[in-house]
């Protein structure tokens, strides 16, 4: 056997197009339409090609270009699903359309949590759907947000009117001074965003901050700035695993001349649904009053980094509860690689 032909994806796409119904005349048949008024696969693809993010859709769907996702194929899968879910929320239809794309690969058919890897990714994507296209009226309509994840505690996410308080500044007296976790840069409880291109040691930088904060003694500064508060630290990692980070911790501590801190904890979110990983992290932070390091935003997002509403929803759903718990989240974010003709200033 010579393996899968490089032309097989094109053959599959042509076969699906030939066998599929005419979008102008097709009726519900259980394959390309799920209910009366539902779009065919071809109609969804046509809408994507005419939308404002058509160029991004084409990069992923037609060319399988993962460069904007740091060449991470799973992140590219979620980016394409993030585009498609506005037009259709039918998991079977999303499965079919994804398999027509140039991102298709054998891994999608591997088992994952009782499903295929692709269906697992689709189910995760459909956890966060806040706006969809109304095919009946041919215009977009806002739905009730599903971003209130069941993994987030109700007291964190559901605020009744009785919980809201209107205040009068004139009655508050003298305002309190800002409190810092790290001198000048770590204002409690606001996130610290570590952003930059790949390979510039962002993860090592925040790891060294975690070691400094978690150390009982011997580390009083970070990058020349005083550490003003010590305590437990949780490193929530969506990129690497325990063994790799363990080596990094060993090397960083050796460089700082300190033992591995007993208050430095680690949670790998690799291959774990984001809500489940953050629920575990929130429980830890609440119990230990810990500071949190999240590495990295792009892999944890499970949405489209180019869509503002996906990014804002991520912060509201996952980062804000950590802030309310009193932590100072360190968030690592990777700069997308430049495409042909692009410039950093743009």
Image (cartoon, grey):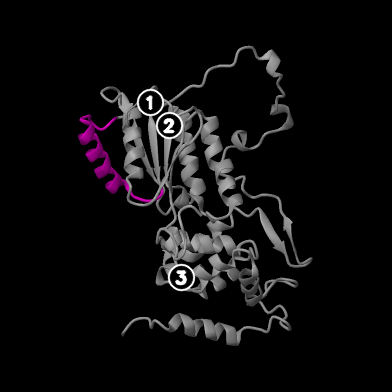
Q: Answer with mark 1 or mark 2, whichever residue precedes in sequence.
A: 1
Helix, strand or loop for disc 2:
strand
Residue 234: image x %, image y %? 39, 36
Residue 286: image x %, image y %? 48, 30
Q: Answer with mark 2 or mark 3, whichever residue precedes in sequence.
A: 3
Q: Which residues are magenta?
A: 238-261
Helix, strand or loop for disc 1:
loop
- Residue on which the image places disc 3: 64
Alpha carbon separation for disc pair 1 and 2:
8 Å
The reply to whether residue 116 is in sight is no
Alpha carbon separation for disc pair 2 and 3:
38 Å
Marks 1, 3: nearer the viewer:
3
Q: Are marks 1 and 2 in contact (CB under 8 Å)?
A: yes
Residue 76: image x %, image y %? 47, 62
Indicate which disc residue 218 carries.
none
Q: Answer with mark 1 or mark 3, whichever residue precedes in sequence.
A: 3
Q: Quadrant of residue 182?
A: top left
């Amino acid at each position: 056997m010579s393996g899968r032909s490089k032309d097989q994806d094109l053959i599959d796409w042509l076969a699906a197009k030939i066998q599929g119904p005419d979008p102008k005349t097709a009726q519900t048949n259980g394959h390309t339409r799920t209910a009366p008024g539902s779009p065919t696969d071809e109609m969804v693809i046509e809408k994507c090609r005419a939308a404002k993010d058509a160029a991004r859709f084409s990069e992923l769907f037609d060319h399988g270009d993962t460069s904007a996702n740091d060449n991470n194929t799973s992140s590219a899968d979620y980016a394409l699903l993030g585009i498609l879910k506005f037009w259709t929320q039918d998991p079977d239809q999303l499965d079919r359309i994804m398999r027509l794309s140039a991102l298709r690969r054998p891994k999608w058919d591997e088992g994952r949590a009782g499903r295929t890897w692709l269906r697992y990714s689709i189910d995760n994507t459909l956890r966060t759907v806040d706006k969809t296209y109304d095919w009946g009226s041919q215009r977009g309509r806002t739905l009730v947000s599903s971003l209130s994840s069941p993994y987030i505690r109700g007291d964190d996410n559901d605020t009744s009117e009785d919980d809201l308080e209107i205040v009068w500044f004139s009655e508050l007296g003298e305002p309190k001074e800002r409190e810092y976790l790290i001198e000048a840069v770590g204002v409690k409880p606001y996130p610290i965003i570590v952003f930059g291109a790949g390979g510039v040691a962002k993860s090592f930088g925040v790891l060294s901050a975690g070691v400094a904060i978690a150390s009982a003694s011997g580390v009083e500064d970070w990058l020349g700035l005083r550490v003003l508060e010590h305590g437990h630290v949780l490193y929530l990692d969506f990129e690497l695993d325990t063994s790799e980070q363990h080596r990094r911790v060993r090397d960083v501590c050796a460089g700082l001349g300190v033992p591995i801190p007993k208050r430095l904890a680690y949670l790998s979110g690799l291959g774990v649904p984001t809500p489940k990983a953050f629920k575990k992290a929130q429980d830890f932070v609440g119990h230990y009053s810990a500071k949190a390091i999240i590495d990295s935003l792009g892999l944890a997002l499970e949405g489209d980094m180019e869509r503002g509403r996906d990014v804002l929803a991520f912060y509201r759903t996952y980062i804000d509860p950590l802030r309310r718990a009193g932590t100072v989240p360190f968030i690592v974010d990777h700069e997308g690689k430049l495409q042909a003709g692009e410039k950093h200033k743009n």
